[in-house]
Amino acid sequence: MLMTNHVHLLISSDRAGAGGALMKLLGQRYVQYVNRVYRRSGTLWEGRFRSCLVQEEDYLLGCQRYIEMNPVRANMVAHPADYKWSSYRANAQGERNALVQSHALYEALESDEISRQAAYRELFRYELEPGLVDEIRRATNGNFVLGSGRFAAEVSSMIGRRAIPGQSGRPRKVDDPESGSLELE
């Protein structure tokens, strides 16, 4: 049986490129450590680092739920609190974890910690919409943005390239009645 492991991180930073720099450093240092300790050589991960820019207001908590439910979807555990590497216990149960810093949108769920944790647990009473799961996967696998059309257009304008998937296939041919020829759209 082939077993693949995926690491999902939701990273917020006020510096451009910080997520990529973190992953580069992690890839360099951690792989060196593993190779040294286990007397091996080569790469540790099969694929490359993939990411997507997330529109906070509409998608951040959905991404957190997606990540924290992955071990459940993979039938590794029955509940996200059962997975020891998950941030669920910090967000939903108040367990202290130096690696987890709550996002402002999480903090805005409720004004006090106990109520905020209860509100967060409530988000897990229902499964994520299948369309959102597909959107998250498509955006991450393609290095596209995850957000509204307006958000994607703003990001495209800033970075000077397409930020959402393009149409697959060849451009459609259309009739040009004035010239009597076919043109590609």
Image (cartoon, rainbow, N blue to C red):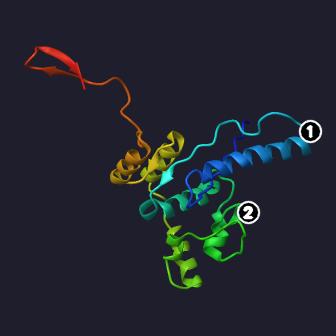
Instruction: Name the quadrant of the C terminus.
Output: top left
* Mark whose residue sits in front, 1 or 2: 1
Instruction: Name the quadrant of the N terminus.
Output: top right
Q: Using the image as rendered, state which of residue 156 and residue 101 is in the foreground.
A: 156
Query: Can you see residue 127?
Result: no
Q: Which residue is mark 2?
A: 84
Say few, some or many: other residues with alpha carbon within 10 Å of mark 2 (under 14 / 14 to 19 / 20 or more): few
Task: Report how far apart the C-alphas of labels 1 and 2 lie in the structure.
Answer: 27 Å
Q: Earlier in the sequence, mark 1 or mark 2?
A: 1
In the image, residue 61 above or below residue 156: below
Query: Which mark is drawn over residue 130?
Result: none
| Percent coordinates x, y for residue 74 in the rendering | 63, 50
What type is the residue that disc 1 sits on?
Arg
In the image, 163: left or right of 111?
A: left
Say what secondary structure mark 2 lies in.
loop
| Percent coordinates x, y for residue 65 in the rendering | 54, 61
Q: Using the image as rendered, state which of residue 142 and residue 116 is in the foreground.
A: 142
In the image, 22: left or right of 34?
A: left
Which quarter of the picture shows residue 182? top left
Say what secondary structure mark 1 lies in.
loop
What type is the residue that disc 2 sits on?
Lys
In the image, 80: left or right of 175?
A: right
Query: Can you see residue 123?
Result: yes
Which quarter of the picture shows residue 36? top right
Say few, some or many: other residues with alpha carbon within 10 Å of mark 1 (under 14 / 14 to 19 / 20 or more): few
Which quarter of the picture shows residue 169? top left
| Percent coordinates x, y for residue 108 in the rendering | 49, 76
Query: Which mark is drawn over residue 39?
Result: 1
Residue at 55 percent of width and 85 percent of height: 112
